[in-house]
Image (spheres, rainbow, N blue to C red):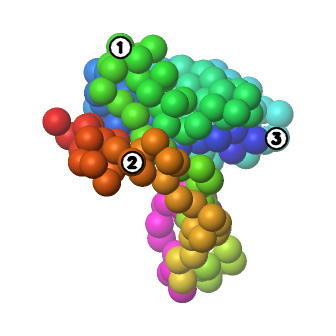
Amino acid sequence: MVGLHVSPDIDSVLYGLSDLLSKERGWGVDNDSFRCLERMKQLGQPSWFSLGDLDLATHLTRTAMLRAGKSLSRTTGRTGQQNGDSRARAADVRRSHLDMLDTAKGTLTFQEYFVRERHQIAVRRVRFEGAHRAHPAPRRDREHRSGGGDHFLRRAIR
């Protein structure tokens, strides 16, 4: 989305752990405004991915941290702490992958399929671009083998 690293699944869990999740929508920050999205629409930009203003701040921060060389795990942990919850962290990976869906309308990212198309078109195939390069970072790999590291979602459901 406009060059930002958006992780809706991670954000929903982070917002839920921090009591920020909009229970009405089931995603995004409670009581968020959408002024930026409204302005983007006025400027002729795509507006199918409804990012609230507070949610947008999360994506801007995450993108800046990732571009500065921080891992997704560190970025997620930091965001969780800044939201008031120290339990949140994502599994460390050196490289991530992108979920791609081959559909009747062509190849789409998962977010395009799920949000913009409202998961209403047939999926022919799911591909995980870059999955062959994704593997645990050394620290998490050692924690996993020793049983010392919990997965992000396991922590989220505690």
Report the Cα–Cα distance between label 2 and label 1.
28 Å
Mark 2 and mark 1 lie on one chain; the one further toward the N terminus is 1
**Mark 2 vs mark 1: in front:** 2
**Mark 2: few, some, or many residues within 10 Å (few <14, many ≥20)?**
few
Q: Residue at x 61, y 79 (%)?
A: 102
Please provide percent x and percent y for residue 153: 30, 45
The reply, left or right, for residue 93 in relation to residue 133 is: left
Question: What secondary structure is found at the residue carrying circle 3?
Answer: loop
Please provide percent x and percent y for residue 46: 73, 46
Q: Which residue is mark 1?
A: 84
Q: Which residue is mark 3?
A: 44
Q: Is residue 81 above or below residue 157?
A: above
Q: Amino acid at mark 1?
A: Gly
Q: Quadrant of the C terminus?
A: top left
Instruction: Tell me which segment is drawn in magenta.
Output: 109-124
Report the Cα–Cα distance between label 2 and label 3.
48 Å
Question: What secondary structure is found at the residue carrying circle 1?
Answer: loop
Q: Which residue is mark 2?
A: 142
Mark 2 and mark 3 lie on one chain; the one further toward the N terminus is 3
Please provide percent x and percent y for residue 14: 38, 31
Q: Residue 154: which quarter of the image?
A: top left
Q: Is residue 44 magenta?
A: no
